[in-house]
Image (cartoon, rainbow, N blue to C red):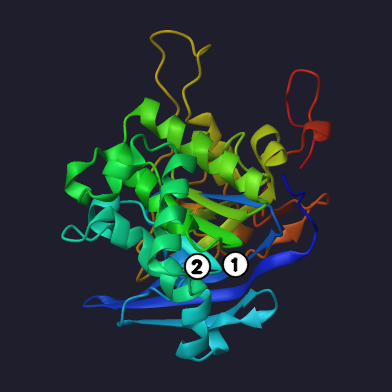
């Protein structure tokens, strides 16, 4: 396995993405900045509608026609938003690949698996039909697809959901990308297959020394499988830090509320789970200031002011919260707060 480095492979700077709707313009992503290092894994979590998938699609140039995008997306120092289409075609699929959340819709239903696996290799790597087929068989073996020879002749509808997702992963890996974006890669899969797919992605990422962006609405998906975690809410970043820090000592009120809402094995019987009150704000007309403010039990007057901006807490930990959760060091022996 290749080691990770501090050199960034992807830098997203002040990304904004807007989507036109009959009701008005949706600010789907609003001033988001992220960094992924070489060989590093980043988990991006948040509720549905928080802007996770739109961020990924902006990186891959997959936003709908009725959308706009600004900011900078630097891949190895080159701004993808400034490159011509001819140059982008050399990057997307070859150097940055994506696993979409629904393989049933992403794979072409009338094209055999072999062609879908080999098409990218023949185009980007310039290999012949025989070599591409040999590589395709090796890829299916790598992602755990049994009887690879027969599977190459199958159509997607002849495979189970878990098998289709493995084929999707193999297709994304075909040109040996240095960055893989996995957008909700276990949607609609049962828990056993879900774990297999997630462990597979982690193993491949480590073995290949590849950078990974793992997007999910489920905190358990990124826990233990990513180096760093970014929490998004209503199109903005709420908190970014090492996965260990974000889970062990969350500072943003939204992150803390998400973790509090997760049931645990030691949860007392017959007691209700903690819920986050309210719903996501209107994306066309979001509230002023902190977008989590209307749902936050600790909201103060300053939460309605413009912002809040991301503030560094040290050790690669940043948070955008006016009234952050007290750090463990600022709590008394019984867990009570002794100051912000």
Tag 1, which secondary structure? Answer: loop
Q: Nearer the viewer, residue 210 or 307?
A: 210
- In the picture of the structure, the residue carrying the numbered disc 1 is 305
- How far is disc 2 from disc 1 in space, using C-alphas? 7 Å
171 lies above or below 328: below
User: Dot 2 surroundings within 10 Å: few (below 14), some, or many (20 or more)?
Assistant: few
Q: Which of 61 and 324 is in front in this view?
A: 61
Residue 330, numbered circle: none
218 lies above or below 169: above
Residue 230: image x %, image y %?
60, 52
Please report the residue visible at 73 percent of the width from the left and 38 percent of the height from the top.
326
64 lies above or below 39: below
Residue 137: image x %, image y %?
41, 48
Tag 2, which secondary structure? Answer: loop
- In the picture of the structure, the residue carrying the numbered disc 2 is 288
Among all residues in the image, which is located at the extreme bottom? 84
């Amino acid at each position: 396995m290749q080691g990770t480095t501090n050199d960034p492979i992807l830098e997203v700077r002040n990304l904004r993405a807007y989507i036109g709707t009959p009701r008005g313009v949706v600010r789907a992503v609003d001033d988001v900045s992220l960094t992924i290092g070489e060989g590093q894994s980043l988990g991006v979590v948040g509720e549905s509608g928080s802007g996770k998938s739109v961020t990924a699609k902006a990186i891959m140039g997959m936003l709908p026609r009725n959308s706009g995008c600004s900011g900078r997306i630097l891949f190895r120092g080159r701004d993808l938003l400034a490159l011509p289409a001819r140059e982008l075609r050399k990057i997307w699929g070859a150097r940055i690949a994506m696993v979409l959340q629904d393989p049933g819709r992403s794979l072409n239903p009338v094209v055999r698996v072999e062609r879908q696996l080999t098409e990218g290799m023949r185009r980007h790597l310039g290999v012949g039909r025989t070599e591409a087929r040999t590589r395709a068989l090796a890829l299916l073996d790598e992602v755990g697809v049994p009887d690879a020879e027969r599977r190459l002749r199958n159509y997607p509808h002849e495979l189970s959901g878990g098998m289709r997702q493995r084929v999707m992963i193999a297709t994304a890996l075909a040109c040996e990308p240095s960055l893989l974006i996995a957008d909700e890669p276990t949607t609609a899969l049962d828990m056993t297959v879900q774990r297999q797919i997630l462990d597979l992605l982690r193993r491949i990422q480590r073995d290949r020394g590849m950078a990974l962006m793992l997007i999910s609405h489920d905190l358990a998906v990124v826990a233990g499988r990513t180096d760093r975690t970014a929490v998004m809410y209503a199109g903005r970043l709420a908190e970014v830090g090492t996965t260990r820090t974000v889970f062990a000592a969350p500072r943003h009120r939204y992150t803390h509320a998400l973790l509090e809402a997760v049931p645990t094995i030691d949860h007392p019987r017959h007691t209700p789970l903690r819920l986050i009150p309210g719903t996501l704000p209107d994306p066309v007309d979001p509230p002023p200031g902190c977008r989590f403010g209307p749902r936050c039990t600790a909201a103060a007057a300053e939460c309605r002011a413009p912002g809040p901006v991301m503030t560094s807490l040290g050790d690669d930990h940043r948070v955008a919260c006016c009234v952050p959760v007290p750090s463990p060091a600022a709590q008394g022996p019984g867990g009570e707060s002794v100051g912000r």
